[in-house]
Image (cartoon, rainbow, N blue to C red):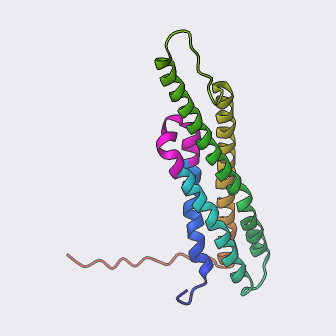
Amino acid sequence: MFGLPLHPLVVHAVVVLVPAAVIGSVLVAAWPRIRPRWGWPVVALTALATLAIPVATSTGEGLEHNLPRTAAMETHTQLGDELLVFVAPLLLFVAGLVLLDHLRRRTTDRDTATARHAGPGTMAAPRIRDGQARVGVVVLAVLVVVFAVVSAVQVVRIGDSGARAAWGGVQYAPQPRHLDRPAG
């Protein structure tokens, strides 16, 4: 695009979306009060991050065929191919967490309303048992945090290996400063 390889441009979507999804997912997992408002937007953000990964890897493969093979590029390619393995489960777990929490809250609200209107001596059977739903929410929250941390670490490793592959042979040489200040 405009004479530039597409991969360095597309990869910025992954570099921004995956860490944002990680932060949002951890917040939704650790802070139950924000799930009703922010749960589904975080799921959508995580879905966008997940979809950006195959685009980045496919453009990377196109770039890879036009560059000489190096050990640094091999490392970067291998790490990049593994990212989807961590972010896709993150998407599934955060979606499951938000859905189960939504169903649990809806059932609890419905049961509370039914109990108020049912009168004394009647019982309404809940659709989801609250104890089982709470255990499920906790398990999913833990899985979300685990996969979020692993995804974040993997993005950092991929970025580092990509920078080493692109710039590994370039030595930084600080330029001398010229103190050209106007007299005054």
Q: Using the image, determine if residue 110 lies above or below residue 64.
A: above
Residue 172 in view (yes/no): no
Q: Nearer the viewer, residue 174 or 130?
A: 130
Q: Nearer the viewer, residue 110 or 153?
A: 110
Would you say 181 lies left or right of 50 here? Answer: left
Quadrant position of the C terminus in the picture: bottom left
Taking the spot 47% from the left edge, 18% from the top edge, the residue there is: 116
Q: Nearer the viewer, residue 136 or 66?
A: 136
Most common SS among magenta residues:
helix
Taking the spot 70% from the left edge, 52% from the top edge, the residue there is: 89
- Residue 115: percent from the left, percent from the top? 51, 19
Q: In which image quadrant can residue 5 be found? A: bottom right
Q: Using the image, determine if residue 149 lies above or below residue 134.
A: below
Would you say 173 lies left or right of 66 here? Answer: left
- Residue 53: percent from the left, percent from the top? 65, 66
- Which residue ends up furthest to the top in the rendered image? 121
Residue 169 in view (yes/no): yes
Would you say 131 lies left or right of 36 here? Answer: right
- What range of the chain is rendered magenta? 25-41
Taking the spot 62% from the left edge, 41% from the top edge, the residue there is: 97
- Residue 85: percent from the left, percent from the top? 74, 58
